[in-house]
Every structure is written in structure tokens, then in C-alpha cells.
Amino acid sequence: MKLFLPFLLFLFISSVGIGQQLALIDPVFEESVATGSLVSTQLRVKNNGDKPIRLGIRLDDPYLKGDQISSICIGTECFTKFDALEVTTLFPDEIIEDVRIRFNAGYDELTRELSLTIYDIEAPGEPLIERFTYHIKNNFPNGILFSDESLQVSKIYPNPVSSVASIDYSLASKLTPATITVHNILGDRVLELPLDASETNLKLPIEQLQNGIYFYTLQVNGKSINTKKFVVRK
């Protein structure tokens, strides 16, 4: 019995050591993200063992709806259709930092979970399995006109408008020129309003408009992105 207990302790310590060879450094397992945003979660994977590891990564429950497909990105390349992806050979104490989980959040407010398996391809029986949770929230309760990683713009509210109309927005860079242009029903441009990157709300000068139907267009870098209708009733 005295010999048996040390043997069991040795097996336990050995199994713990194998299971801890791969580790995520400072992972973010749960976060809130905006509807319409491009979500990118960086993974920093470290080899804590004393031998090189053929690093493999697998998304166990990838999301495959429309343009919201979840993927694993390595550097500038993203992969969506794979059962197991061999990333690199990770040497002892080496950390790889250019791996990311990536997906389009979509426009539904919900909670999405993704399960990730990180393992040694030579010894797949001791994987590191982690689950990531994303709470997708609508930052603009009045509806989104357009959204990507550099710009989010709400629809005009209220609509119809009698006195004050607003647009909420978030512009990531001053180097991305964005403008709201307003046309009347005849197609004449009646307003041209730049979005200031230092602000998050645009008030439309409704006092300059007569009662009627108007169309507003978001333009980014001089290109028309999206057009919606609003009504002025003073």
C-alpha cells in the first residue's frame, strides 16, 4: 500500500502536467458586443511543456448562418470549413499571438456561445477546451442604418418628425469621411451633414425643411451606402 499511493500520486501529477501543456494567456471568455459589429477575439496560446507541439485548433460548434459564419483567423487568413486546423509547431515557452475567433454579430440581440478545442495533434487525447460567450446588444435601440468595424449609424428618430430629429453614430477613425445627405421627393439635395468623429449624435436642422417625404443617404468615402425615408410633419 505504501508503494501504491506514491505511484497514484505520480500518475496524477503526470496527467496534470500533460493537460496544462497548452494554455491561453489572459483570455476574454465573456464579452458584450454591438449588433452589426465584426467580432474578433484574439487568442494567445502558450506551450508550457518541454517539447514542441503541433498546435491544432477546432471550433466545436461553429455558427454557419449567412454572413455570420464563425471562423478561425491566423494572420490575415481566415478559415471557416475545417474539422481540425493545424496552426503551427509551438516550441517550449513559445506564445503564438496572431490567432483569432472571428464572426459577424448580426442584428439580433442574443447570446452566442462558441466552443474551442486547442490540442497537440500528436497527442489529441489531452486537449484544452474553452467556451467563449458573446452577449450581442443593440447600441442603437431605434434601429441601425449601417454597421461595420469602422462605423455604426442609426436610423433617423423619431420618424415621422415634428421638431427634432437625431441620428446616433460611432465613427472609429477621423480618416473615414462619412456624410448624411438629405434629398426631397424630387431628388433635390436639401441637406449635407458630415459626421464628426469626435461626436456620437447628429441633430438634423428640421427647421430648414418643409412638411413632406424625404430620403436620407449615408455616404462613406464618397460612396452611397444606404438610403432610408423619413417624414416631416410640423
Image (cartoon, grey):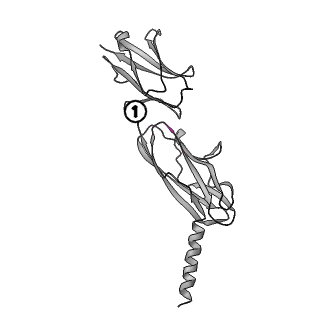
Quarter of the image containing the C terminus?
top left
Is 11 located above or below residue 140 in the figure? below
Q: Quadrant of residue 117?
A: bottom right
Left or right: where does residue 141 sit relative to residue 219?
A: left
Q: What is the secondary structure assignment of the residue under circle 1? A: loop
| Residue 195 on the magenta segment | no
Is 191 located above or below residue 104 in the figure? above
Q: Position of residue 218 (x, y in %)?
A: 49, 22
| Residue 39 on the magenta segment | yes
Q: Quadrant of residue 126?
A: bottom right
Instruction: Give the magenta-colored segment's residue range.
Output: 34-40
Residue position marked by numbered label 1 in the rendering: 140
Q: Residue visible at 68% across and 65% down? A: 122
Residue 24 appears in the figure? yes
Q: Residue visible at 49% across and 55% down? A: 131
- Please, what is the three-letter code of the amino acid marked with disc 1? Phe
